[in-house]
Image (cartoon, rainbow, N blue to C red):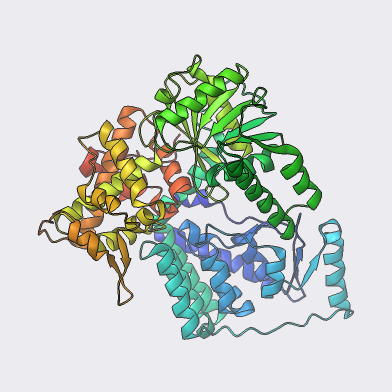
Amino acid sequence: MFNVGADIMSMNEVTSRDMALEIGRKGHAAFKRIMDLPFPTLAAINGAALGGGIEVGLYHDYRTVASSPGGCDLYALPECFLGLVPGWGGTQLVTKLAGPKVAVDLIIKNPLSQNRMSKSTDVMKWGLADKMFHPQDFYNDSLQLLIDIITGKEKIEKKQADPKMSDELYNEAKAFVVSKVHSGAIAPYRALELIKNAASWSLDEGFEQESQALADMIMANQTRASIYAFDLVQRRAKKLPGRPAGVDSIKIKKIGVIGAGLMASQMTLLFLERYKCPIIVKDIKQEFVDKGLNYIREQLDAKVQKGRLNASDAKWLGQDLLSGTVTYDGFEDCDFVIEAVFEEMAIKQKVFGELEAVCKPECLFLTNTSSLNVTEMGSKLKDPSRCIGFHFFNPIAVMPLIEIIRGEKSSDVAVATCFDMAKKLKKTPVLAQNAPGFIVNRVLTSMTDGVLKVIDEGASFKQADEAVAELGFPMSPFTLCALVGPAITLHVQETLAAAWGDRFSVHPGLKKAVEAGKKAIMTFQADGSIDVDPEIAAMWPKQGDKKFTDDEIREAVMSRVCLEMDCMLKEGVVASVKDIDTAMIMGAGWPFFMGGASMYLDQTGISKKVRGANFHGADPFAD
């Protein structure tokens, strides 16, 4: 590790803008003393460099980085991801040293692309480092380089970057920000302006503008919400809240997977890579099994081609440890079996019944169902305590959340094992009690419910969709509907309406769209714009004539979300609103700057209007 920057949690102690302004100014002043030293300076970046850790290096005359792996694998300015801007020189120095395109990539695009990290090769390519050395001799090689520079044995040619940003790059960068956060987030737009104007400012002028921007961001509600979200995923989630204390989990030495479709194959690949133990995959036809195994082996081969896995390990994982079958032979010694078959209760119950007849008594039965009743699924087992929900999100390699669904009979051992499995898989587990829709799908469906309600009352499809998208969600409501499919959206509506008909309903317009075979509610029009499919508009029930502003739409939709979150807490589906927020951030990609949802709802006053009180007290960080 080189330097991972400031402690973002300390921002909570800032009580005024003047105090926030001093953070930026004092940081600039301290680091600039390095730049003003009368002799050559070198920053030897031997490992992770994040935020201020990058910025301090930029004040040096020369920079070296340790090669990957084992060296500078984590290099990032993640401030925009956290609702901030780089405040100690990043926007100005990167632009002047490497040019505005690199600055946009490092400061804006990477943070808004799931907080993507860069490596030493990227740093060299950008011109932000002068030499790359092997980690083993990194310190000595870096020191020798500085000695050689001072004695004249080595001369480093510095390429002068043009800090001026073209209109084309500015417009492209702004369009990227709009595509990611719409108008929801302030920070990336502010960072873009700092990068754009760097060419016309002296360093001192640029540093002062950075300090002013940082002060504004620190005092903004979005930053407070981002800090809360950061605390959820970086501190609280790692404590595994909800895991039964003092309960030992089952040791996993062999895994069974029922189903060889895409979702099942993605799960199997992850299990192989993390557990490195024998895995047996079953499906009803050999051709299905072969297709699934081939997919897994192709993914392993692709990792070999990219240098992320050696060929012998790929063969060991994909050939020696992985097997397939159309029978239950080989399942008798599995420690857990997870099913990913068709989303129908009778089929899943049949699978678990067949497994119980062949598996050892302590083997756990996991279901990847997205909404079905876990208690009912295990109700026909002789030992229903072994049945538990373990819900992945698609794509499995990218989405970090796992919902652990505790049925009424699920044992503490089953729950503890699932928590420990999620940790082994490098996923974030959130515990939910058995209830239709669990957490993420229930909240998302309440949002869909709110959107359809304002449309029924008179808002246009386009206005409702775009107004909600402006909050900064990864995709608009109808884009999400198109991604999962209207049929799946309808299915979840039906499931939730059956449980809570007073709040959820099966929308007749959506049902007609599914019956007509529609794959999306909104489509590209002849003029290239996106609007409701004319055929869907024609079959949709007659709308009211109420006129909405965009703000009114957002309040109505998020009020519906707030109501459902409150109901989930009252029902005991989750132990804390922090579980809902963690799930929405990690499973649905809801932005940090909303604090999942609860901080936004509190900050806008929606919580008090809907439930009579905020979700959080004076200290939202209290466990």
Q: Is residue 395 rendered to the left or right of residue 578?
A: right
The residue positioned farthest toward the top in the image shown:
382
Query: Picture coordinates of residue 73 (x, y %)?
Result: 69, 58
Q: Position of 232 compared to 611: left or right?
A: right
Hey, which quadrant is residue 47 in on the image? bottom right
Quadrant, the C terminus: top left
x and y percentages locating residue 422 in the rendered image = 58, 36
Asked where in the image residue 461 lies, by quadrant, the reply is bottom left
Q: How many marks?
A: 0
Q: Position of residue 188 (x, y in %)?
A: 45, 67
Image-based side of 184 in relation to 610, left or right: right
Observer able to see residue 247: no
Q: Is residue 210 above or below residue 228?
A: below
Residue 146, can we see it? Answer: yes
Residue nearer the viewer, 463 or 330: 330
> Which residue sits at x=54%, y=77%?
204
Q: Nearer the viewer, residue 34 or 158?
A: 158
| Residue 282, image x, y percentages | 60, 35
Left or right? Give the position of 67 relative to 179. Answer: right
* Residue closest to the eye, 138 or 151: 138
Quarter occupied by residue 610: top left
Q: Is residue 86 above or below residue 194?
A: above
Question: Is residue 179 positioned above or below 336 on the image?
Answer: below
In the displayed structure, 316 sits above or below 413; it is below
